[in-house]
Image (tube, rainbow, N blue to C red):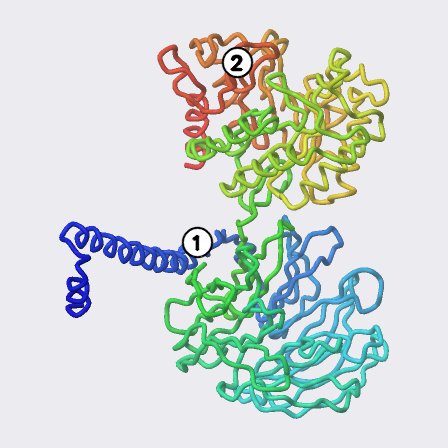
Amino acid sequence: MAEYMSERNKQGFINNTQSHKRNIKIVKIYTVRIMRIIKYLLFHILLILSVFLSAQSPFSSVLIDREGPERPWGKCFGDLNNDGLVDLIIGGYIEGGLVYYENPTWQKKVISDQAGFSTDIEVHDIDGDHDLDVFCVRKNTLEWFENPAWNSHVIDSVICHDLELSDFDQDGRIDIVARDQGEFGHRGDTLFVYIQANHDEWKKSKILCADGEGLKVHDINKDFKQDIIINGSWFENSSDMLQWKKHAFTDTWDFKSTYIDVGDINCDGREDIILSPSELKGMHYRLSWFEAPVDRSGIWNEHIIEDGLEAVHHFVGVADFDIDGNQDVATAEMLQGDNPDEVKIYFSDGTGRTWSKQVLSDSGCHSMRIMDIDNDGDMDLFGANHNDRIIRLWVNQYNSSLSVRDNLFYLDYRPFGMWGLRTASASQNDELTNYLIDQLDDYKNVGLNTISVYIQGSSGGYSDPFSDDGKNLDPFHAERLTRIIEECNKRSMVVIVGIFYQRVFSDENAGIRNLQNAQAIFNAVQTVTELLKPYRNVIINIANEQNSGRYKNFLSFDMTDPENVIALCKYVKEMDHNRIVGAGGYDDLSNIDIGKSEFVDVLLFDTWSADIDSGHTSGWHYDFFREQGVPDKPFVNVEIFGGWTKIAMPPGVYPDSIKDIHLAEIDEAVKRPGLSVHFHSNPWCQGPSGGDYPIHYELGGKGTADDPGIRWWFEYAQSKSIEEIK
């Protein structure tokens, strides 16, 4: 630098001012560069932290049975009663037999009352009668039980620990591979292969292998033939059932007792192998995944997920639990290990190098199963400790799932006391949609857990976003609606989605309506049902106030006829069997007809000014509908008092006499299991047709002139709900 400055001085170019400016410029350049480096480092630090902080998925633990089969070693799942829902299967080694629990009531059904059901169960329709049969490892046999009579068929007298089903010879019939374990005086050095001739005749062969535990079937080399994976090696299916070529996939893993699964951990399109150490207590090893090379016959690089684990991890499974496109790894410790006995998920960053662990329980588990128990698109976990009788389900709440059991709602298999608000026009434009979403956290805090939104809107704003044939919904409207649903799902909230609104069908609005005929009505229902299929926190309400005379202006389809509304409910169920669908209005006789239908899961009724005059509360309607033979199903008043609510003016101001009428609705609902009420205010949260005051989705306050709003109603409902819990 001195030589440089000296040279510059010789040339006479320098002066103090220029030098000072040049130095400032240099400092600025390096400052910018340093700031860029700092920003780069901060970005990647935050990126790494985000993996650890955000890669979590909420789970709720559900007790299926406190007194299940004793020593419930075998676990499986499958839709055994063909109702579209996955049932849970348990086999007891000591007593309690082989049973399954019907989803969603968890009523226990006995397949066999015998003992001796061991450590693996699988399902398959072996006899082609369109129901799932149950294959079991028993104490000294392999057997399958024929659904629905549950007659036993013995495949072989053999002692095994693991069982897998696959069509190895590609003849269209299911085959079997089984293996014992290599501990407790047993030998796991033989694979038993059973090729099916018919469902009572099997050709048995043996494959000698390294001693140990663990078995998985998968097409490793993508030749459309199922291969066999064990601890440290895989056997290639050559199509000759007597010739299986062995390939070692690791030269670093030497632990013989394993649990095995397969999944594409690093998102390269090749499915990797995951191993956990399954036996024995007091020993320690690691949880690892093995990266599939292009040439699957070579060595697969091992990547350690966690080292130093006790060898009691008798389960490992791969699934995308947080629905981020990356495969995560679940595992569980058995009770005989050192405490805590963790049931846990390792969330992947998509590379398999960075993992975030979430512990679901410290109560331990054995041979768990992964499935979508509630058809909501996220993966759940099911299992039991091998030396306990408690059967548990861990329901993934990433996507909330609403169900009905008798006359009660359940969200993710937990009782769901519904308190709602009618926000009918919220999907009509971006401003209203964003406005509503901004309030959801506040709603949740005061116990408001359900909102109703109508696709065609309400008096506060309405439109017909369907095409004239009903086969399409305006994509911007669909985006707003699904955004509301998704935001509610994040908060374990429910959305009642109404399809049709009566003002759109009136003569004065003929220019607004696009739907042209009865077929378009059915098409619109199909469009909405298909759109909502991914969302299980949704109830479909066919029509707002279906008995409104405005519907009669639409001569092609009479929505006021209960049979027509029931037909639309049936249509929904045909497309989405597990969708909760309902309808109703403020005509009691129509509500009775609708409520009695087997295709209606929930009666969605209204009350109006005439009910105020006659003293017919929501509780009165509940009792009346029950007396008239409406079966045990939920009743929801989706619009208490209708247009009568205009009496509370100015908006959000409620005299004590009006408050008392509203609060009585809460008291009535609390007394009657299965009755839910939704707050409605025409002036506050809906906006009357032609009115000059805005829609309010914020809850406001105490309902006084100084503190207008409707918060007081939900705070009272929340306090009553807490009292009921106590």
Secondary structure found at label 1: helix
Asked if one can make out residue 71 in the rendered structure from this viewpoint, the answer is: no
| Separation of marks 2 and 1 at Cα, in angstroms | 40 Å
x then y, percent, for residue 276: 50, 76
Question: Relative to 576, is 91 above or below?
Answer: below
Question: Relative to 206, is 658 above or below?
Answer: above
The amino acid beneath tag 2 is: Pro
Which residue occupies the foreground of this view, 244 or 628?
Answer: 244
Location of residue 494 (image quadrant): top right
Question: Relative to 425, is 276 above or below?
Answer: below
For label 1, the residue is 54
Question: Relative to 61, is 143 above or below?
Answer: below
How crowded pointer 2 is (Cα within 10 Å; few <14, some 14-19, many 20+) is rated as many
Asked if one can make out residue 468 in the rendered structure from this viewpoint, the answer is: yes
Secondary structure found at label 2: helix
Task: Classify the position of the C terminus by image quarter.
Answer: top left
Which residue occupies the foreground of this view, 584 or 120?
Answer: 584
Residue drawn at 16 percent across, 50 percent down: 17
How crowded pointer 1 is (Cα within 10 Å; few <14, some 14-19, many 20+) is rated as few
x then y, percent, for residue 560: 78, 19
Which residue occupies the foreground of this view, 678 or 94?
Answer: 678
On screen, residue 518 versus residue 426, left or right, reads right
Location of residue 601 (image quadrant): top right
x then y, percent, for residue 533: 68, 44
Residue drawn at 51 percent across, 28 percent down: 670
For label 2, the residue is 683
Residue drawn at 67 percent across, 78 percent down: 220
Task: Classify the position of the N terminus by image quarter.
Answer: bottom left
The amino acid beneath tag 1 is: Ser
Location of residue 119 (image quadrant): bottom right
On screen, residue 545 versus residue 34, left or right, reads right
The furthest residue to the front: 11
